[in-house]
Amino acid sequence: MTSLIILFCVALLVVVTIQVSKISELASKIRGGEDRYLKENDRTAKGLVVFMVGFLVLTIVSAYYYKNYMLGYGPHESASEHGGSIDFMFNITLIATGIVFVITQVALFWLAYVAREKKGRRALYISHDNKLEMIWTAAPAVVMTFLVVSGLIAWNDIMADVKEGEDYIEIEATGYQFGWEVRYPGPDGLLGKKDFRLISATNSLGQDWSDPKNHDDMKVDEIVLPVGKKVRVRITSKDVLHNFYLPHFRVKMDAVPGMPTYFVFTPSKTTAEYRESLRNYAEYQVPADADDPTGEQLWESFNYELACAELCGSGHYSMRRLVRIVSESEYEDWLSQQTSFYESTIKEEAGDDALEEDITEDADDTMDSE
Ligand SMILES: [Cu+2]
């Protein structure tokens, strides 16, 4: 009801404004102010052109100022093999819409100036023009088709799953409020089975210990991956929606509880290489006059990171994890230092008792089924 009354008031206000302006227009005509009216009209039309020029100049200045924030430029180059095609789509879309933006703004303000009211001038009336219709239908259609088709091709390319027999590393990221559990498959290269009913204080992922593939699976704090190798990330969530986001690799995928998703990508730059590429950018250097106790430049301490890109609750910000891309040999070294979660936690803590318990439970199950 309140909104209806407000709407009615707004409508009334509009009517009042129109009536008042009509009256003042009439009054100025009666006072013989037609010349003054035309002069004012002239001034407004010229003002619009000045506004357009200022507006476009500022647009260009701000585009130049922020050019380093464009994907794929300056310190924002992608660090994955597919990243370039995403950056290309972003930038080509920005350029296409930018051109249309300039054309329409110029047309809008320039025409308002050129076609302003003048003494003795009559408005030109065009009821139909096939040529014009063709141009403004065909031109956007061609551009849109190009954008949509190249977008589709890029999408199918990026979202393609690994093929059978292909060499890749598969890891798993499970989002929860508030963090990520990252599981590596261990020496066998295979992730073990999970069942949410097995989730407990000591088994946060619900790994099924009767599946031997689980025994060498490792949980890690830092995501370390070798450069130039295909990685398939299984993405899932334990509670609410999260989003597995690796901005530097142009990787972004929802983590949906109960619905596994994945993303396949190939890191193309090691952390050390990426740091080196940031070396010359002012935003990655500590200013000479700054009070810097570490004496370290910002580019030296740069790290790739995993973030959650789905607002998932009060601790959303704290879901950051470090990602390190290293050479193949460094990766093997790091991998050999990781211990299996089963070996280090489950087996040691529970000792032989748990194993015995498992056996008795199994025996009970068999009796039940009989
Ligand atoms: Cu989250």
Image (cartoon, rainbow, N blue to C red):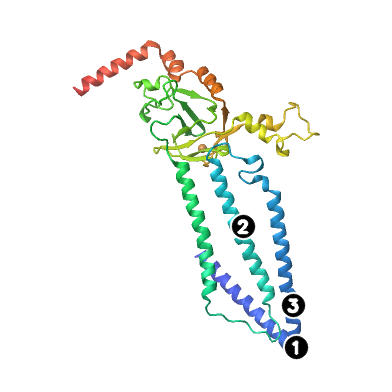
Three-letter amino acid code at disc 2? Gly
The residue at label 1 has a CB less than 8 Å from ligand 1: no
Q: Nearer the viewer, mark 2 or mark 3?
A: 2
Mark number, residue 32: 1
Q: Of callouts 2 and 3, which one flags the residue occurring earlier in the amino acid sequence?
A: 3
Mark number, residue 98: 2
Mark number, residue 40: 3
Residue 127 position within the rendered picture, expressed as x and y whole percent measured from the top left: 53, 80
Q: Secondary structure at mark 1?
A: loop
For image coordinates 36% across by 12% down, the residue present is: 353
Query: Alpha-carbon neighbours of circle 1 within 10 Å: few (<14), some, or many (≥20)?
Result: few
Residue 69 position within the rendered picture, expressed as x and y whole percent measured from the top left: 65, 45
Q: Of callouts 1 and 3, which one flags the residue occurring earlier in the amino acid sequence?
A: 1
Query: Alpha-carbon neighbours of circle 2 within 10 Å: few (<14), some, or many (≥20)?
Result: few
Vertical arrangement, residue 310 with respect to residue 300, above or below: below
Mark number, residue 109: none
Q: Of callouts 2 and 1, which one flags the residue occurring earlier in the amino acid sequence?
A: 1
The residue at label 2 has a CB less than 8 Å from ligand 1: no
Quadrant occupied by the C terminus: top left
Three-letter amino acid code at disc 3? Glu
Q: Secondary structure at mark 2?
A: helix
> In front here: 370 or 249?
249
Q: Are marks 1 and 3 in contact (CB under 8 Å)?
A: no
For image coordinates 51% across by 70% down, the residue present is: 134
Q: Are marks 2 and 1 in contact (CB under 8 Å)?
A: no
Among all residues in the image, which is located at the extreme top? 352
Residue 202 position within the rendered picture, expressed as x and y whole percent measured from the top left: 43, 22
Spatial separation of the CA atoms under disc 2 and disc 3: 33 Å
For image coordinates 70% across by 82% down, the residue present is: 118
Spatial separation of the CA atoms under disc 1 and disc 3: 14 Å
